[in-house]
Amino acid sequence: MAILFLAIIAWVNSPCNLLAQKTVDSKLSENRQRLNVLWIVSDDLSPELGCYGCDAVSTPHLDQLATSAIRCTNAFATAPICSTSRTALVTSIFQTTLGAHHHRTRNRKPLPDQVITVMEAFQNAGYFVCHQGKTDYNFQHDFKFDGVDWQNREPGQPFFAQIQIKQPHRTFETNTQPERIGKIKLPPQYPDHPLTRIDWANYLQSIETLDDKVGKIIERLQKEDLIENTAIFFFGDHGRPHVWDKQWLYDGGLKVPLIIKSPTRAARTDKQLISLIDLAPTSLGVAGVKVPASMTGRDFLAPNSEPRTEIFAARDRAGDALDRIRCIRTEEYKYIRNYHPELPYSTRSSYKNLQYPVLALMRVMQKQGSLSPAQSRWMLPQKPPEELYDLRDDPFETNNLANSEAHQSTLATLSKKLDHWEKETDDQGSTPEMSAAAMQKLISEKKQWYAKTMKKRGLKPDASAEAILQWWYQELNVPIEPPRK
């Protein structure tokens, strides 16, 4: 027995085994020192937070997070709708390059072999990769998450986690603070009407629920002694779900809050232009993980990072709302190209017709002649082929300068840059998504869904705007009579 014991001691202390043990110990030590990375992703959120200057909403948890974080004031999605935006987010490649630009396309394709998602990059680096909530990626994939919660990782193993929070996606929560309704500052393209204010108050109430959920996540990190070793990225997947915003390339559809709290980065306000395709390489960079060559975004927190001078975004089919729109945005200007100017802003969208009460309101007010020029633009029979906005003087993008003689040089410059981006990134927007028969089937199914939902509401599929508005008045408890003809 003594001989066996001595033999074991000799084996344990042998040079080969000591080297192996040192390697294991070194790896464990390295893992313990590597930052965890947490993405908290909100569905349909513009920067309507207290820390971004909105005084009609109470977001104490996010406001507190922002005090010790990098608060980015110019972050933008690559698309104003979830599946296409999220595709670009996790691949760091524009959805238009991947053929994933139509929302929830039925013609989903696998990613090219050389494309590595942010999840795979972290997993390949030894991270425990977990996910809670929706994925909604617009491509075929067989990626397997390691779990839904970081508590299941190996001792000392760093994690990359995504927590998806539904709020403030519609259907909104009901506002519980009557005084909020009067505090709301509506953009000028929305009619200042009790229905509009109630709808926005419900949106802000949903944001407060979001804030509560974020607070619980941060509290958990603190209780588990993880807060000092975790880089937190909080952001929206695209902009707010209101008439002129979601599905459109105005800032209301693209601009999102982005708050980054990292133990290795000092708190500050960051005004540089950021695209959400930059989040994957930046997250990998913060963690010290090699960025895959396939990723086209930039690590904007890297020491020698060159700030963007412009961001690009695209909108294509969204449900049964067909369209193709592209834009380039600088700090000063937004240029939008409408490939289908024959389609009006108000082209049929079953989703919006069912979910957006202000649409019915605007249609009734248009009949009454009570919309302002900025609001009635929604009802024009077609869109302009080009739009140009001076964001310094016109932050709500209501005054189209495309035909202004004083701005033709700016228009030409931005148009040329957009041409270059489309060619450089192999924009597949001109490629038909599916056969005409398949498209007609999709549209028919959307109409059936619309009719079924309207029936549940006690309305006919072809109900008038007045009848639909009456239903919304009752649904949202609007305390006034609906507009009359």
Image (spheres, rainbow, N blue to C red):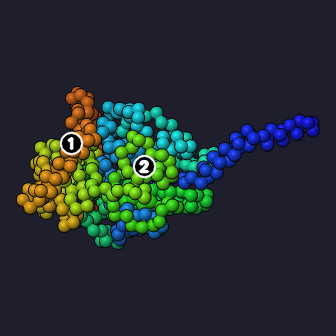
Q: CA distance from mark 2 to mark 1?
A: 30 Å
The picture quadrant where one finds residue 208 is bottom left
Q: Which residue is mark 1?
A: 323
In the image, 237 versus 35, the foreground residue is 35
Q: Say whether disc 2 or disc 1 marks the residue closer to the N-terminus.
A: 2
Q: Callout 1, which amino acid? A: Asp
Placement of 232 over or under 419, stated as above or below: below
Q: Position of residue 123 (x, y in %)?
A: 52, 42
Q: Residue furthest left?
A: 405
Quadrant location of the C terminus in the rendered image: bottom left
Q: Quadrant of residue 470?
A: bottom left
The secondary structure type at the circle numbered 1 is: loop
Q: How many marks?
A: 2
* Residue reaching furthest to the right: 2
The image shows residue 225, relative to residue 133, as above or below, that is below
Instruction: Report the residue marked by disc 2.
Output: 281
Q: Is residue 321 visible?
A: no
Type of the residue with mark 2:
Pro
Q: Residue at x 42, y 49 (%)?
A: 281
Dot in front, 2 or 1: 2
